[in-house]
Image: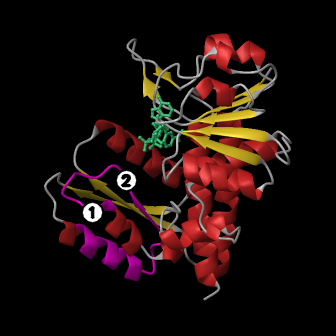
Amino acid sequence: MIILDGKKLSKKIEDSVKSDVLVLKEQTGRTPGLAVVLVGNDEASQAYVNMKKKACDRVGFYSITHEMPETISQDAIEQTITMMNDNPNIDGILIQLPLPPQINTNRLLELVSPAKDVDGFHPYNVGRLTTGLDGFVPCTPLGVMELFKEYNIDLKGKNCVVVGASNIVGKPMASLLLNADATVEITHIYTKNLKEHTLKADIILVGVGVINLIKEDMVKDDAIIIDIGINRAPNGKLVGDVDYENVASKCSYITPVPGGVGPMTISMLLANTLKSAKLSKKD
Ligand code: NAD
């Protein structure tokens, strides 16, 4: 069994982003810029934004966080996004989800300029992904694809079962796998007898948010397991959606939590922001 080391790969990607930033600065005098919208006091959201900001600092990006109260209006957030769309120092705009219930999230995601949509959530970029065109791809599934590349895992013809069908994880993950010529099945909370599906999988990719959802008897020998879930266990530890202790020995490859997909997500955000900065220099 081989552990897919996202921590190590993300460091490698960060180093490459960092040196590209220096070159870009030298050539154009400009630094890639990321703007984050953070609404309310959700602890997990604050922690994620903090990690993203630290990563920006490490690679030499300019970054700004627009912190807004839980009671903020739709109009006020829209004004901020419009301002960032027009700001030439900003290459990437990220709206930290989830947002409070009074906010229409989809309307905000559609307001972000597709050219600065480094999270890849705008329908324009979603459409480009599903048609196999270049664009911005959501960071978490993109990070998984980088792991496959790093470990020379060929996806062509593989039976992949994606568990979880959200717009930010499962659906874009499925599109990327399909674009890589895998055979893809998407499962979700209403899927009947999940085990029947996962047992057929060469690769299981799970991003659900349920501790120990994927158990030993749901995985065939030598399967590849990508655990995208992040959960806080009752003992305070971070765990994924896979019963790692009992599943790992059956697999050919597996991602740990923490240290697997999580760090890759952050480095893909950096890579997407750098890509946007490079593209905008060509205008
Ligand atoms: P979500 O709530 O938007 O979607 C969850 C999906 O899981 C839904 O499609 C739902 O139908 C499915 N689901 C729920 N219970 C299920 C069950 N018992 N069996 C099968 N399917 C089930 O969540 P999300 O935003 O997509 O996040 C999912 C998980 O991925 C969470 O644990 C989140 O913390 C994690 N996540 C990790 C990263 C990362 O960087 N590693 C990034 C984003 C999300």
Reading the chain from its start, which is encountered first: label 1 or label 2?
2
Q: CA distance from mark 1 to mark 2?
A: 13 Å
Q: Which residue is mark 2?
A: 96
Residue at horizontal 58 percent and vertical 16 percent from the top: 243
Q: Are marks 1 and 2 in contact (CB under 8 Å)?
A: no
- Determine whether 234 is above or below 158 in the image: above
Task: Give SS at disc 2.
Answer: loop
The answer to whether residue 150 is seen in the rendering is yes
Name the image quarter holding the C terminus.
bottom right
Which contiguous range is marked in magenta?
A: 77-105
Residue at horizontal 13 percent and vertical 55 percent from the top: 71
* Number of numbered markers: 2
Q: Position of residue 140 (x, y in %)?
A: 57, 47
Q: Residue furthest bottom?
A: 283
Q: Position of residue 69 (x, y in %)?
A: 17, 54
Q: Position of residue 116 (x, y in %)?
A: 49, 72
Tell me the crowding category of disc 1: few under 14, some 14 to 19, or many 20 or more residues within 10 angstroms, Cα based: few
Q: Nearer the viewer, residue 18 or 161?
A: 161
Q: Position of residue 205 (x, y in %)?
A: 64, 36
Task: Choose top left, top right, bottom left or bottom right for residue 17.
Answer: bottom right
Q: Residue furthest front?
A: 192
Tell me the crowding category of disc 2: few under 14, some 14 to 19, or many 20 or more residues within 10 angstroms, Cα based: some
The amino acid type, in three-letter code, at marker 1 is: Asn
Task: Give SS at disc 1.
Answer: loop
Q: Which mark is residue 104?
A: 1
Q: Is residue 238 left or right of residue 74?
A: right
- Determine whether 156 is above or below 163 in the image: below
Instruction: Judge whether residue 252 is colored magenta.
Output: no
